Image (spheres, rainbow, N blue to C red):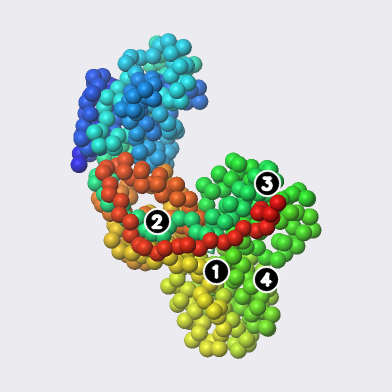
Amino acid sequence: MTATVFTPLRSEWLALRDRVRTPDLVRSGRATGESRPGSVLVAGVAGALRDDLLPGDLVVATEVWRGEDPSTDPGARIICPAAPIVAGDLRRIGLLVHTGPIVTVDGVVHDPDRRRRLADTGALAVDTESAGLVSTDGTTVVVRAVVDTPDRPLLRPGTPARGVAALASLRRAAPVIEAWAAATGERELLLAGPRSFCAGVERAIEIVERALERFGAPVYVRRQIVHNRHVVDDLERRGAVFVEEADDVPPGSTLVLAAHGVAPEVRSTAAERELKVIDATCPLVSKVHQEVRRFTARGSTVLLIGHHDHEEVVGTRGEAPEHVIVVADPEEAARVEVGDPDQLAYAMQTTLAVDEAAETVAVLRERFPSIQGPHNDDICYATTNRQGAVRRVAAESDLVLVLGSENSSNSRRLAEVSEAAGTPARLIDDASDVQLSWLAGVRRIGVTAGASAPPLLVDELLAALGGLGPTVVRPVGDAFEDVSFSLPKEVTTA
Ligand code: SF4
């Protein structure tokens, strides 16, 4: 697999000549039609089509159009799948980067009306070469630095300074171009199954969606409905308003309680404010609350195995704060002091690492032989299945990518399970978090997603990785899930 960097103009080639040593840096000239096998990156300058792009900004093409209307010729639309990864790396080194279509036309656009027409197509920038310099295997990347804009056209007194700014940005992009070259190549992508949304997360999201349909915006949601930035951003766009506490909600409004569950005092506050409460607590979390109530009603102290500050643990502990002690791990289990060891029970956060939780229980059982536990493990089916699948994927991978947000407990556990199996893992919110440097020399990548990460993010990640070289996707794991939970009556009955 080769990686070629095309620089159409001499000035562009000069900007990168001393900085991009690894790949084949080709001064292609303005002649087009020079497609190549292997991965191709086109680096150069361009004209912006929108006023919010400034000289020196970079545009990374999500697609390149040959001519002004690609709809008339499907072959005139060249998809650039690796754009999110390359743009992410460029942003991390401080460059201002836009992503979107770039249109390639025959000559420099001086006519403002033509520029406006090109802008109307939705393209961000225009150049005269990219569409003619593409990879023959669908792994083209285009990075263009803006020189001229609609209100700063070419052939004006400021043009040379704007050209200098654009070439300076291109020079700054050189380390990313080198990292791109090192990251290209053929790969196998091992796709863990099951992965992504669980029944509790699907239910919680559907509750907010139905509440918005039924009651109209705004619908208030206490804390993140599920721990995922993309899910929260999407619902926010549709009219959900996320608040910290029930106190922040105007009296009489609709409030959805998030999937992680809440302490009873939150329900009391909501009742005092006469809020219309819709409970999106996952039924498997509610089950743990019931256990805690059952054990403490009998006079037992409950050792709640979980992470001290996690919302689920805070909510569960809130059922009987005087009688629940949080125990994070085997070390804390070895140290915890209790009043009456014969009046003791344990319960668990639903999203723990299965192996570590078993160790913690073993320590507690050894210290307190009469301790009572739940009938079945509290760790939910989704957590158990996803950890089992990622363990299998990790065994065959050089690197595991876990889609999930930093505050998602079950996603973090997936990364830890991979690391414990000896395979480095990275927790990423989406494809733009992937760093090219992680991929150099990596030929087998495991991919999974936490229970709160949308399946679409997995598809986008696979596509982006495919933009760095030919990939084969191999599903790994076979755990079949057919769990579903009913919705609360507030969003189902008329
Ligand atoms: Fe429910 Fe488990 Fe999903 Fe949490 S991870 S919402 S407990 S099914």
167 sits left or right of 199 in the view: left
Give the vertical position of 242 relative to 95 (above or below).
below
Other-residue count near label 4 (Cα within 10 Å), few / some / many at <14 / 14–19 / ≥20:
some
* Dot in front, 2 or 4: 2
The image position of residue 48, as x and y in percent, is: 43, 22
Cα separation between marks 1 and 3: 32 Å
In the picture, the disc for residue 319 is 4
Instruction: Give the amino acid type for the residue marked by disc 4 in the picture.
Output: Glu
Other-residue count near label 2 (Cα within 10 Å), few / some / many at <14 / 14–19 / ≥20:
many
The image position of residue 223, as x and y in percent, is: 62, 54
First reached walking from the N terminus: tag 3 or tag 4: 3
Instruction: Give the amino acid type for the residue marked by disc 3 in the picture.
Output: Arg
Determine which residue is flagged by label 2. 448
In the picture, the disc for residue 349 is 1
The image position of residue 137, as x and y in percent, is: 25, 37
Helix, strand or loop status at disc 2? strand
* Dot in front, 3 or 4: 3
